[in-house]
Amino acid sequence: MNALQRIIASWCGLLPRRPQGHPPHVFTDHLGTHYYGWSDFANLPPARANEVDDIMLQIDAGLSHATLGQLSGAISDAISKAMELREAKAKTNALAKANALALELKARPSRIIPRECYYALAAVCCVRADEDPYAFDPSIQAEKMQTFREAAEAGHTFFTQSEAFAKLLGVTHCSAEGFSRLSIAWSAQEARTAAMLRL
């Protein structure tokens, strides 16, 4: 819904009443919960802007904190295993695994936006009707991310309608077609990461 459509809808009484202190209404999810958001990420309150900065750093690196933890943990485990082994071939195999995982980390910056970062950014750029728009609550953030993930799996991408979100990622990633392309890339990337971790 664009700005003109929102104005017309508000005149006709079709939009929910805006809670005190909330930005304008942006969308209603598949469960009937109303969300509010800013037209530009520059207007986000400081607590949310800090989260956006962290998420954008992860996107630039092509690696979410969770995946970084998985890969670095696997590298550390492979090196520890190599140090314990006495047989040269087994030691070489363990070090080769650590090296392959390290190369995977190095190759990440040229890859796609991580799935978790996409949902995290969508969630931080909007405010659920029951949350404080000027604070960042990690538990509400996790609930919104889960709601968006489940909705996306059911074919609903209403959460991409936030203007701030679209301006941060670009409209090509926030359209229905863009989301479909990202979903395919995510599946391939996650399968690759799982294969690397099983080496």
Image (cartoon, grey):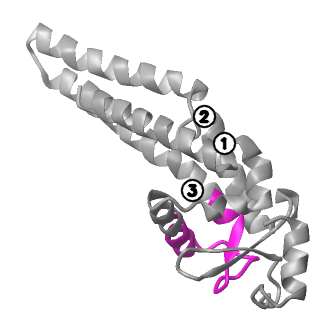
* Horizontal arrangement in the rendering, residue 192 relative to residue 137 (left or right): left
User: Is disc 1 surrounded by few (<14), some (14 to 19) or many (20+) residues within 10 Å?
Assistant: some
Please tell me whether mark 2 sits on a helix, a strand or a loop: helix
x, y percent for residue 161 = 72, 61
Tag 2: amino acid: Ala
Tag 3: amino acid: Tyr
For the residues marked 2 and 3, what is the alpha-carbon distance in whole angstroms? 16 Å
User: Mark 2 and 3 residues: CB-CB less than 8 Å, in contact?
Assistant: no
Q: Residue at x 73, y 58 (%)?
A: 50
> Which residue bears the numbered disc 1?
57
Residue sitting nearer the eye, 78 or 7: 7
* Horizontal arrangement in the rendering, residue 86 relative to residue 189 (left or right): left
> Which residue bears the numbered disc 3?
119
Q: Residue at x 47, y 38 (%)?
A: 184
What is the tally of numbered marks visible in this picture?
3
Residue 76 appears in view: no
